[in-house]
Amino acid sequence: MIISALVKRYEDTAELKPGWQRRDVHYALDISEDGVLLGILPLGDHGDKKNAKLPLTLPAIGSGRSGKNAYETAYFLCDDGSYMLGLDPKKFESAKKLHAEILADVKSPAAQAIVAYFNAGVPELPDGTDTSAAIQQKYIFMINGRRVDYHDADSEIVDAWHMRISSKSNNGEEGICLVTGENDSIVRLHDKVELRGVTMGKQPLISMNDQTSFRSYGETPKEPPAKVGTRAAFAYVSALNGLLNDDRHRQFIGGDTLVFWAVGNDNAEAEMFSWFANPKESDGDKLSAIIKQITIGKLPDMENLNWEKRFFLLCLTPNAARISVRFFHVDSFGKIIENIADHYQNLTIGENQKMHLFSIFHILGNTTIKTTGGKYGEPHPLLKGQLLNSIITGAIYPMTLYYAILTRIRAGDEINRAKAAIIKAVLIRNYYESEVTTVSLNTESIMTSYNLGRLFSVLEREQQEAADSELNSTIRDKYFASACTNPKVAFVTLLKLSLNHARKLGTKGIWLERLKGSIMEKLDEKEPYPATFTIEDQGRFILGYYHQRQDFYTSKKDKESNDNE
């Protein structure tokens, strides 16, 4: 389904014909009509750049070259200095042979000049040429200072190239393409995809490993890894490379790359998705207003947006020498936006019931230990894609996320708004919790774990009020982890300590004692302090603590005045 969707994408947006691709070029070899090298001219803006490049439409290079065939496989009309400048004589001969074969019957001046260039032998390079850099840089041809747009201007060269790729494809096994359902030459080596993070450069999305354990249905690497025809193979690779190189249809999520597109003209939908998935703080109010509309079942009317349009999301992750698909999801554009809006709604917590648009990076950062510089560490490598998938599809959140947050809190991390919001979201979606997953404090809840979290917050506040000076540490630092997991043991000690704090406060602590009493009245008479808490009850405990602590931000004078009425 991934390949067929990408082929459809190519058909909807095709700018390149089969056999052509966009490639970056550094320099042009300016040659005369007789093939004499006149000079080497830079392409692109070389003003402040040492390695400037110009993207051009050039003959496709196929699946690339490596190992033994590096001396046998030159690229047509554009290659590096070892082939084009003869910095490796064997490779220069390979390029000469290739161009002679393709352009043998082409009579255009440009074609004859190129053939003459190679027939003249390895050229003499201009003084001062940096051969160590030149061997890596890419070169095309100019004829007397005029760049040849091979795919457009010189129709004879274009025809010769098309004949070449047609004859090569016809040498493959004939069969029914699984993508198009039509008879075509089946491709054995698929073109490569340029994905960020692949350590060995471009790699094919579809390939077969040489080891027996990785062979598919007994086939060997000499056979096609999939029954994909020439036209479909070119189309899906062209479409995917186009998406990966377009920041309007691509986002980086840690080491993963997410590409997204819709059927037909999708500029409006892609812009909206990108804005929704990775909002800026300055867009918070506007985005919140749209999310509130969506959560009540009303998709707002927006110019050029089609909420019913099919929307595709493909998340890719790099490996050492291959590309892995993290997930692929297809749904209506409106449903995907609704899922993201629901995610943001789940995360809403805190003062004034204001929606806070936590980014994926912020959520993942809270699962890690902060570095000495105050920056977040690197999260679990699989968590990024799993979290993104759950947000987009509306599936349950990865439990790795939940466990990581609980671990950080039990280890002593601050229970900040983000951590509380994540716990709230997981409890809603994964455990169908509704009683305590409110935006702010729920004083009516009778859930033991939630109320014990509230009680812990009151005991901590009482300790702080009773202190003669600001405390360096509170019961939170010493007892929170045990109270969250084994409350029966912890609260016996905590309640004894609170008696001393209450005596010290005297009448100033009446409002806290009343609050403590009202919470304890909600506890189970037979077992007010369970021996252990389940993993979901630990989350409820933390939410109770966070909600009660946030409620303390209300003026203490207001509370005292209410108590005296």
Image (tube, helix red, strand yellow):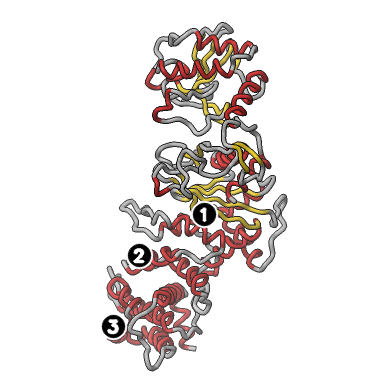
Front-most of residues 209 and 150: 209
In the rendered image, the vertical position of residue 326 relative to residue 439, given as above or below = above
Q: In what element is the residue under mark 3? A: helix
Q: Report which residue position mark 2 lands on.
A: 408
Task: Tell me the amino acid under the disc marked 3.
Answer: Val
In the rendered image, the vertical position of residue 291 relative to residue 424, given as above or below = above
Q: Report which residue position mark 1 lands on.
A: 327
Left or right: 191 as drawn, with respect to 91: right
Q: Position of residue 404 (x, y in %)?
A: 38, 64
Q: Using the rendered view, name the quadrant where residue 127 is placed.
A: top left
In the rendered image, the vertical position of residue 113 relative to residue 564, given as above or below = above
Disc 3 vs disc 1: which is toward the camera?
1
Res 498 seen here? no
Q: CA distance from mark 3 to mark 1?
A: 45 Å
Left or right: 124 as drawn, with respect to 460: right
Q: Earlier in the sequence, mark 1 or mark 2?
A: 1
Q: Report which residue position mark 3 lands on.
A: 489
In the rendered image, the vertical position of residue 120 relative to residue 207, given as above or below = above
Q: Position of residue 494 (x, y in %)?
A: 30, 82
Task: Tell me the amino acid under the disc marked 1.
Answer: Phe
Q: Using the rendered view, name the quadrant where residue 520 is placed.
A: bottom left
Q: Using the rendered view, name the quadrant where residue 226 is placed.
A: top right
Residue at 51% in and 37% down: 189
